[in-house]
Image (cartoon, rainbow, N blue to C red):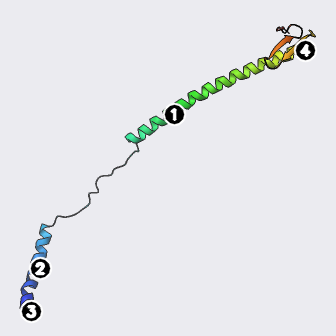
Amino acid sequence: MNTILRPLLALMPLAFAASLAFSPAVQAETSRLVIESGDSAQSRQHAAMEKEQWNDTRSLRHKVNTRVEKEWDKDDVAFDLRDKCQQSVNVNAYWESNTQRCLDRRTGRTVAP
């Protein structure tokens, strides 16, 4: 058995040297640095969708605020008219809350306070 191992042991250094000669050198290339700014197609699309949603909600808020302002103005005018009607010299004038008008008790017609 010794006679079989001796030639193999003698060939091992040569086999090791040959394997080193034929194996490619493995090194990581560290000369490049990649920094992502986060500016991708997906992030741009997400930003565009958020802007569109913001504009839509802004438009709706503007419409709601305009409507609330109109209702406020209408109630404010009705409040002033009710005060004038109640303080009117005309004893037949009364305030109709359902229609928010000053009416004459006898005729039911609108009275200018």
Spatial separation of the CA atoms under disc 1 and disc 4: 51 Å
Secondary structure category for the residue under label 3: helix
Image mark for residue 13: 2
Front position in the image: 72 or 28 = 72
Earlier in the chain: of badge 1 and badge 4, it is 1
Q: Mark 4 points at which residue?
A: 87
Is the C-beta separation of discs 2 and 4 under 8 Å? no
Which residue sits at x=13%, y=71%?
A: 19
Q: Name the residue under label 3.
A: 2
User: Disc 2 residue type?
Assistant: Pro
Residue 80: x and y in percent read 82, 17
Is the C-beta separation of discs 2 and 1 under 8 Å? no
Image mark for residue 33: none
Is the C-beta separation of discs 2 and 3 under 8 Å? no
Earlier in the chain: of badge 3 and badge 1, it is 3
Q: Which mark is nearer the camera, 2 or 4? A: 4
Image mark for residue 53: 1
User: Disc 4 residue type?
Assistant: Gln
